[in-house]
Amino acid sequence: MTRDSGTTGALSGDTLLRVEGLKKYFPVRGGFWQRSVKWVRAVDSVTFNINRGEVLGLVGESGCGKTTLAQMIVGIYPPTSGRIELDGIDLGKSLQSRNLKTKRKVQIVFQDPFWSLNPRKMVRDIVGEPLVVHGVALGSTVVRKVGDLLEMVGIDRARLFSYPHEFSGGERQRVAIARALALNPSLLLLDEPTSSIDTLSQAEILNLLIEVRNRFSLSYVLISHDLSVVQYLSDRIAVMYLGKIVEIGDTRRVFRARLHPYTEALMAAVPMIHASGEVSDVKPLEGHVPSAINPPPGCRFEARCYKRQDVCAVEEPPLRAIEDPEHLVACHFTNV
Amino acid sequence: MNILEIRNLSVKARTILGTASLLSIQVLDLGAGEILGIVGESGSGKSILALTIMGLLPTNVRATSGSVTYRGQDLLRSSARGLSARIRGKEITMIFQDPMAALNPVFTVRQLLEEVIKEHHPDYDSKRVRGAALEMLQLVKLGDPEVTLQKYPHELSGGMRQRVLIAMALSSGAKLLVSDEATRALDVTIQAGILKLLEDLRNKLDLSTVFISSNIALAATVCERIGVLYAGELIESGPAREVIADSRHPYTRSFLASLPVPERKGQPLPIIAGRSPDPLNRPRGCSFAGRCPIVEDRCRAEKPPMLQVSDGHDVLCHKGGTHQ
């Protein structure tokens, strides 16, 4: 396998997570006796780093592989190939190959707190279970620790014995965050953490996430289809298209430069109100994401791109630095 | 000329716990060929408004007073079988958040569309029905309409399904479209296309749209005017750009201030404490009084009046427009 570039991501600082050439191909069986196999290339050679205390935003349309990528990092799916390193230690192929100590360091918060919390368990047990499983606390210390965690996320410890249905959407997401923080992780994967809650609760969750990050110098991988949430929370942003990172760099820089035509299209489609009260106009992106089963041989965005030229259909553009060594773009025509 | 006028509307639900007040709107107008945005959080009454207009309220929910007038005819007064049935579903149609749930999966797009067309145009022969189906798909800008007609809903992407649903909704010759979170499940790039389509249909067919969304930025890009719902009450309405740049209700202001826009990166977002009031037990005074940063004694004691800020910009607040 050839590496697309030297180091993808932050060059300086204290690296927490290194993802190198990560791939996930899902088999699709068909034909006589289900013998013929095609592969869905959900994540295809993704490489990046995350520093300690850094927030990386992952954006892209549905089906671009961002959730699969996050689920490989947390260990839900074993990667087809590639490496995931945390603190310099290889996390191995599957969740089974990780020991309790490394499992503790990577936690996930799911999109919908209505589904991710067991309705038959009290908050004490939902948040306390990881403490017990990992042998961090026992007996009455569990209750005390869970109380502390709840208070940290802004929920009264008197509600220890409440069930999930007694909480609002925003509060449930706080419980999910408290559970994720219970084991003192160094990396949190946030998969659409605010997309099923209201704007006002969203503001509270965003404030909480920033506060917790600063307090424990946590790193986040933030997945969201809401670009305003991503730009608000992320230090760096990675734009994915059909299993590949097409642009990665400092959030403000990527938002300003929009070097990849896909980044440009994605950002132009987002309705946004500025602090001045100005409302941005939206521009749709024509066409559809091609199938990940047989991705086009050249640039994967070629069919929908307005900068398209002959070379794009045959040669896949490498992810390379433009202007700034930390701002990488996979496009043949970044300056056209 | 207004196509839809709502006056002093009150919608209540009978529950085992008592009567819940779900919606209370003093004045809301929709002009012909206008796209009106209705924004608010979940539970604010957006969908109840859509269902009231459509006459699809559940059996325990009823419009207890007021009027919903469509082209001079009160939809709440006319009997279900008479006038209202000829208007609702024909001249007033609706599209939903989840197009897959609204499309029957065992029929092709052709069958789905032709069924609606036949229903509304019993005089059409089969050739004319076919032509009309094709025309509808072209109207909603579906690429390759001939091919799309042969497909089943599951073979289409979310954006294409929503376009098919719009085509079905409009094939009765609808004048008023109610869109309830129709783009919520779509990617932003596809969502922008649906917004453009609604603008396009407005220009081409003079179609009026009630555009319901929880995303105020989204509503502001496509709507001339927006109305903000809070706890079932229309608390502010006016030209979209004016409501956003010069909002007068403390709720609208707080709501806008809590959006994570680029300019606020690195700063904590302001929070409004508390929850919206219980529909079973609405407060005597202003429904926002419990959370309002500029609350006064009279706000807790009496209902605020509808005050005019400027022509077409109204606010439901005792201190309407005077605070800074």
Image (cartoon, coloured by chain):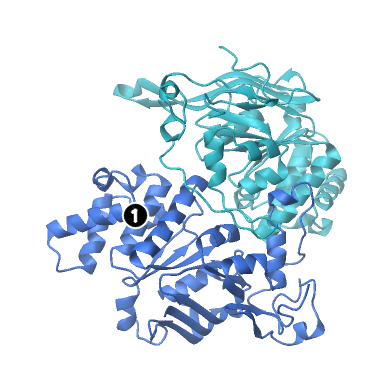
Chain colours: A cyan, B blue
Give the position of the C terminus of chain B as an image quadrant: bottom right
Q: Is residue B162 above or below residue B75?
A: above
Residue displayed at 21% across by 58% down: B132
Q: Is residue B14 above or below residue A282?
A: below
Residue located beneath label 1 in the image: B140
Position of B265 compared to B111: left or right? right
Q: Is residue A137 visible?
A: no
Which chain is mark 1 on? Answer: B
Q: Callout 1: helix, strand or loop?
A: loop
Horizontal and vertical percent for residue A213? 80, 41
- Amino acid at the residue labelled 1: Val
Horizontal and vertical percent for residue A250? 70, 34
Give the position of the N terminus of chain B as an image quadrant: bottom left
Which of the pair B223/B227 is nearer the observer? B223
Write down the quadrant of residue B235 in the picture: bottom right
Residue at the outermost top position: A1
